[in-house]
Amino acid sequence: MKFVDEATIAVEAGKGGDGCVSFRREKFIEKGGPDGGDGGHGGSIWVRADENVNTLIDYRYTRRYKAPNGEPGKGRDMTGRQGEDTTLVVPVGTTIIDADTEEVLADLREHEDIVKVVQGGHRGVGNTRFKSSTNRAPRQFTKGTLGESRNLRLELKVLADVGLLGLPNAGKSTLIRAVSAAKPKVADYPFTTLVPNLGVVRVDDMRSFVMADIPGLISGASEGAGLGIRFLKHLVRTRVLLHVVDLFPFDESTPAGNARIIADELMQFSPALEQRERWLVLNKIDMVPEEERQARIDSVIAELEWSGPVYVISALSKTGTDALMRDLMNWLEADREALAGDEDLREADQAHRDLVEQEARERIQMLHDQRRKNRRKDEDDDDDDDHDVEIIYAP
């Protein structure tokens, strides 16, 4: 199934049914009376998160959703049928945004989270409601109101504890294949990973966490180069970032220089995300001659002035991966325990996560606006070129 992580749809709630004007007419009943029933409420539209859904692809093909209208009222005080609510099912981790105002309506982070996005119209009332001692034959009624309508942007961010980032061919896909059941494509050319991959890492029978592998980043990713801006947002909800660096790059680049490129792109995309817990993972140690290994490792750490955790592994041969996964599991468990026992720490953590979300959304919106502006400029330039053409009439 194709992975789709963003879609724009239009939703419209149902109109409320009109009230009815009717009078009782029965044989042997000398004096009837008003018996017009009320209309039915229009159907609303809800959005529900389901852990069994993993893509927004359905919303790429069907862009408009309308809930049923309420039926009008009828005589004999019969109320019209209410329009049934419509529920749209999306993956867990979907953010719902009003495309016109950029207001975040909901962030569905848990299975069965549900939110009403448009309210159905209210029903009209029939003439029975207007009868009184002074108005015995009312002909008044009210019409049902229109339902709400909105343009929505659905954004999916994968939910993972650990996120992998690095240049293309750094070995991220090989690593997630080595430690989980995920089977992303692996090849000896760049950009073999085109969509995020999730893998469940089981440290033992009762302990596990989720790891996300996103497509490789390149210089300029935060400005939209390559696949970066589209998938950087999937790192927003991770708790730990593993910065995978190739110790034996196939070109003339250096491991430290490559690591610096990714750090700079992360800073440009979201300064708050750059401050998240990040571990340096030096990969492909098996490609470096044994007598050169330690010198190369020390050189990378010194050039980066790295003070955080450092792991040296070979994802292909699984050298060092077990220790890395155990330490990740221990760190995640300790982090959860600390958050559970300290309300202030929980609030600070949530504030930081909200800041990362905000910065990421603002960055993406800025790039979207810039692209639209460039397209309009290109169209204007094309129009100007038409007027600049010199027309020569033959004698």
Image (cartoon, rainbow, N blue to C red):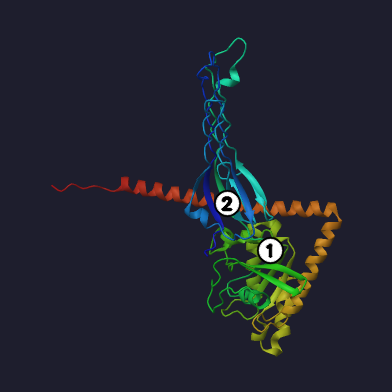
Query: What is the count of numbered marks?
Result: 2
Among the 4 quarters of the image, the one containing residue 214: bottom right
| 106 relative to 149, above or below | below
- Residue 381 visible? The answer is yes
Q: Which residue is mark 1?
A: 160
**Which kind of residue does numbered mark 1 sit on?**
Ala
In front of the other: 311 or 61: 61
Q: CA distance from mark 1 to mark 2?
A: 19 Å
Residue at 76% across, 53% down: 350
Q: Which residue is mark 2?
A: 154
| 353 relative to 315, above or below | above
In front of the other: 75 or 64: 75
Answer yes or no: do the residues labelled 1 and 2 have beta carbons within 8 Å?
Answer: no
| 135 relative to 267, above or below | above
Say whether disc 1 or disc 2 marks the residue closer to the N-terminus: 2
The percent position of residue 4, horizontal first and vertical second, equals: 54, 59
Q: Residues within 10 Å of mark 2 (few under 14, many from 20)?
A: many
The percent position of residue 51, horizontal first and vertical second, equals: 64, 59
The percent position of residue 88, horizontal first and vertical second, equals: 57, 50
The percent position of residue 103, horizontal first and vertical second, equals: 62, 43
